[in-house]
Each structure stands twice: as structure tokens, then as C-alpha cells.
Amino acid sequence: MSVLELRSVSRRYGQGASEVSALSDVSMRVEAGELVAVMGPSGSGKSTLLTIAGTLEEASAGEVLIDGVAVSALSGDDRAALRRHRIGYVFQDFNLLSGLTAVENVALPMELDGEARSKARAAAMAVLARLGLSEFADRFPDELSGGERQRTAIARAVVGQRRLLLADEPTGALDSVNGDSVLRLLRQACRDGVAGVLVTHDARLASQTDRIIYLRDGYVVDESSARPGPESLLVNEPPR
């Protein structure tokens, strides 16, 4: 069973002559352990796809399933619980809370979901350690470098029992070294059993994912398996 499945999903805004189609009849599946890149020019529907996959907005037509459960069948409260428990988001601008330390930012989703502070902090510290951030746990976001902030955002996205990781241009504000580091972390999360969807304009990074889906004007126009090139050595994996 796929972690994420979109079945003929469309998204339209406005009505009548002013109606605009952001997505049209998009279908895709993402399995546990798989990292899928979504590419396309600006305005092709990439970010809309992520917000619908993450239950942040509803499709105008079609169906979204997460772990086999149809999102349309869930109440508003159940969707919110699904986002807290199962879905992690990574954004280009990090979205860290400036008044909280790195470990507090990572632990916050678990605490908001009713987890005891001590247990949430322990889980957050474990994830930060996996990402090489233990020594920065008590620093505030403005005391971290761009790469450290992005790794903290990834830690927050995967802490707990997350099943789906959605990343919207997570390397856009980073240099190539930190961008490659972020990709390695996303792939590590997928190796741990998470299903990942990465929106990117960077063809070099996309080439290191498992599949690439191409959007244009809201339609899926192509899909391919990524072909490892010399840069695949950056993720320390043998060519498939």
C-alpha cells in the first residue's frame, strides 16, 4: 500500500470566465522508502500539489489517500491530527520559531499533540543527534547557519512517527555543499521508511532521487527514473 496516492486530482480557483486550473487530472503514488522529485517551471502546480498532498487544501476533483485512507472522508479535526502525526513539512525559509531553541522547535509538534515535555525533548534530541546537531540543540535559530537551520527544520519534520515528508524547494536558499547535505538527510529519512516528495528546480539534485515527475500547466507531462551520474557519489550510495 502506498503512503501517498493521488487519484486524478485537479485543483481549480475562481469560477466561470475567471476560473484558473492549477492542477489537472494528476495521479501519482509514493511508496515508503521512496524519494520522488517534482519538477516544472514556475506556475506549473508544484506547490499546489504539495499543499493538497499535505491536506492543507482540498482538491476540486479526485482523491488523495494517505496510508490508504481517503482524506476526503476525514473531518477537519482528523485531518489536523493526520498532519501532526503523519506528515512532515520542510520549507525553503525554514519556518523555525525565533524564540525557541533548536531542540524546542523540534519537540514542539509532539508537545502540541499532548506528548510529555520530557519525552518530546528526548525524541527531539535523538533526531538532532542523527543529523549532527547535538551541540547546537540549545541555540536559537539566529545563532545557527543556514545549513544548520535547514537541518533543524528537517529534524522537526521527521520527529515522531511521520510517514510522509513534503519538501518545497528546501535547498533553494543554500549553497551547493549545504544543498547536498540536505538531500542526504532527506534520503536518510526515506531509508528509515518515510515516503518523500521533493519539489525542486535543481536538476542535479533531482537526478539523485528515485523518480522525477514533471509538471507543466498543471498536468503531469513526463515521469522518469533518475539516472545516477557522478554526483550520485555525494549520497554515498552505489548506482542502482
Image: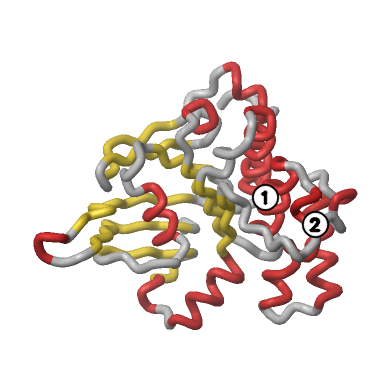
* Colour scheme of the rendered structure: secondary structure
Q: Residues within 10 Å of mark 2 (few under 14, many from 20)?
A: some
Q: Which mark is residue 192?
A: 1
Depth check: give the residue in front, 214 or 47. 47
Q: Which label's residue is closer to the chain start, 1 or 2?
A: 2
Q: Which mark is residue 101?
A: none
Q: Residue at x 66, y 22 (%)?
A: 233
Q: Nearer the viewer, mark 1 or mark 2?
A: 2
The three-letter code of the residue at mark 2 reads Phe
Report the label total: 2
Residue at the extreme right of the image, as rendered = 135
Quadrant of residue 7 in the image? bottom left
For the residues labelled 1 and 2, the Cα–Cα distance comes to: 28 Å
Locate residue 146, reporting x and y percent. Answer: 70, 42
Q: Residue at x 73, y 75 (%)?
A: 111
Q: Where is 232 relative to 43, above or below? A: above
Q: Residues within 10 Å of mark 1 (few under 14, many from 20)?
A: few
Question: Is residue 69 left or right of 187 when viewed as pictured?
Answer: left
Considering the image in quadrants, where does the C terminus appear?
top right
Residue carrying label 2: 140
